[in-house]
Image: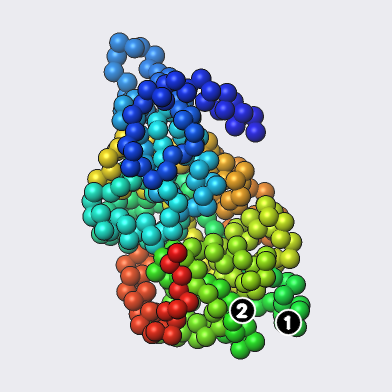
Amino acid sequence: MKKRFLSLLLALTMVLALAACGGGSDAPADSGSSTGGSQDSGAQAPADAQEPASGMDALIEAAKAEGELVVYGSCEEEYLAAACEHFQELYGIKTTYQRLSTGEVQAKIEEENGNPSADVWFGGTTDPYNVVAAEGLLEPYAAENASHLLDDQYRDADGNWYGIYKGILGFMVNKDELARLGLEAPQDWQDLLKPEYKGLIWLSNYNTAGTAKLVINTMIQKYGHDDGIQYLVDLDKNIEVYTKSGSGPSKNVGTGECVIGIGFLHDGITQIVDNGYENIELVIPSSGTSFEVGATAIFKGAAHPNAAKLWIEYALSPECVEQADDFGSYQFLVIDNAEQPSQAAEFGLDPDNVMKYDFEDAKNNITTYIEEVMTALGSAADDRFQTE
């Protein structure tokens, strides 16, 4: 809170400086008010003003000269807004943002094909990142702050993306509704296929949500290719709604509209802690589950390349990621100099209690897997796939 208060005081001194900054009128959404930063905010100037800046100082100067950054975010909007506003406060760079699911960002960047309407991507699971990286639509960058990542699994080997958090896949159930129906909570993936759960389960859309793409990869890696796809066909018989966003099921469990939601358990924690839905129970599948790595990346052809690089350094710092739990995002953090959110541990989530996930297989085959799943489902599921 002290850090946020000091940042606010600093921001008040920056209004006139930002007012002088230009900005593209076509940017998706402003990061807040006209709050910005003076030219000496957020970083120390070189000790000798007569000599050229180097390293991080040079990057900050170059980013400020560009004066603008556009962010597509696939984390929850409250955290996205806070991260963008704080970046703007620190560096005086006009920062605009738009919240889109990972599948929507992927489709947009593919359509724009090297002439992106945003500079960076922030949040959301890495499966769609890997697709656009393989298509040459992300810009590799050797980030200095990547030295703080806990493990190499939290970065792309070629520097196309870097991890900022880790989330565990599982079930969120409405205890009251299950009791009313006389049903026990499912404890494992195979339980979801039981006929008594017909019409009670929500999942996200395989075409629009990175969460759902992770579910595909998890089932194929867990059961094998053919049996994994057959599992998803069998699961479809019990699914009532496929939401556009991966967090969609979690947002409807507390109200009882969704009785069993498949998604990331930190989204369930948000509903319990922030929205007061104490009727939600979190379930880690007993035979094992997988995890997401939430990432950040630079788009190939970004209009503000230096501001984009500075964003990556910022996103890999405690200054950015420790804001998450202040704004309803309770994922495990993946840099060694950040303080973990206490809520995840309080709900019994263990970031290491997950199956070994084959990122390379997911990276190389997810596009084909989605096509195969949609073909196997046929037209029966079409009217339940939400895209808005």
Q: Which residue is mark 2?
A: 200
On screen, residue 321 above or below 124: above
Q: Nearer the viewer, residue 290 or 321?
A: 321
Q: Nearer the viewer, residue 243 or 86?
A: 243
Q: Position of residue 282 (x, y in %)?
A: 66, 66
On screen, residue 235 above or below 356: below
Q: Can residue 228 be seen from the camera position used here? A: no
Label 2 crowd bin: few (<14), some (14–19), many (20+), radius 10 Å: many
Going from the N terminus, do you reach mark 1 or mark 2 first? Answer: 1
Q: How is the image coloured?
A: rainbow
Residue type highlighted by circle 1 = Leu
Label 1 crowd bin: few (<14), some (14–19), many (20+), radius 10 Å: few
| Residue found at x 64% / y 71% | 257
Q: Position of residue 245 (x, y in %)?
A: 48, 63
The numbered disc on residue 124 is none
**Regarding mark 2 in the picture, which secondary structure is present there?**
loop
| Residue found at x 59% / y 32% | 4
Q: Which residue is mark 1?
A: 181
On screen, residue 379 above or below 241: below
Q: Position of residue 161 (x, y in %)?
A: 37, 50
Q: Nearer the viewer, residue 299 or 289?
A: 299
| Residue found at x 64% / y 29% | 2
Separation (CA) of disc 1 from disc 2: 11 Å
